[in-house]
Image (cartoon, rainbow, N blue to C red):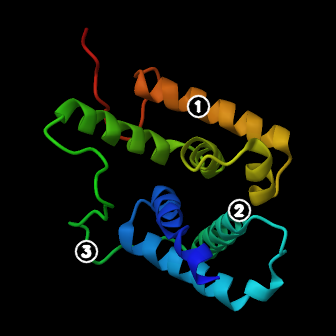
Amino acid sequence: MASIIEREVPALRRFAWALLRDTTAADDLVQDCLVRAVSRWHLRRPDGDPKAWLFAILHNLFLNERRSQRSRGAMMPLDDGEEGNIADPLTGDAAELRLIWRDVLAGLAVLPEEQRSVLLLVGVEDFSYAEAAVLLDVPIGTVMSRLSRGRERLRRLMEGEEGPTRPMLKRVK
């Protein structure tokens, strides 16, 4: 059990961070997910995919926390000066690549949660449409349409056709 769960932790952290954009909150969400998975390991289907099960737990915990926050109202962080970041996957002095990376993350943040989740699951974590549909508890057609709309909106944001919350990199050719 431990080795099965342990190998999925980096992907869970990546998904949680992409949903929350805060390292501390993402780590807390992954921790809650792992606690829930270990305590309910006996309830998991033996023939089911443990990765999909873990991602479903994490996504459901994320949705529950968002619903809870809406009912409580917005909270201001105590330390506004620090942005939580997982280590930048781009290394070296590739300034343009870093700006593009920043713009993609900003574009993802603008997308509705439903589209962002599907884009991350299918595009980043390599879940199939069917697996993502089961994980999100929606029909496969809904996954396909959310993915299509999310990709199109992200493309428009990256090309400057649609205004994000902050200015994005302008390409000059």
Mark closest to the chain's N terminus, 2 or 3: 2
Image label count: 3
The residue indicated by pointer 2 is: 52
Quarter of the image for residue 119 reads top right
Q: Which mark is residue 120?
A: none
**Contact, CB < 8 Å: mark 3 with mark 1?**
no
Residue drawn at x 53%, y 69% is: 7
Quarter of the image for residue 24 reads bottom left
The residue indicated by pointer 3 is: 79
Task: Determine the secondary structure under disc 2.
Answer: helix
Name the residue type under label 3. Answer: Asp
Question: Percent position (x, y) of residue 146?
Answer: 70, 38
Name the residue type under label 2. Answer: Ala
User: Horizontal placement of 97 versus 138: left or right?
Assistant: left
The local crowd at label 3, few if under 14, some if 14 to 19, many if 20 or more residues have their Cα within 10 Å, is few
Give the CA separation, mark 2 to mark 3.
34 Å
The residue indicated by pointer 1 is: 151
Task: Determine the secondary structure under disc 3.
Answer: loop
Question: Percent position (x, y) of residue 155?
Answer: 50, 26
Mark closest to the chain's N terminus, 1 or 2: 2
Name the residue type under label 1. Answer: Arg
User: Horizontal placement of 58 versus 13: left or right?
Assistant: right
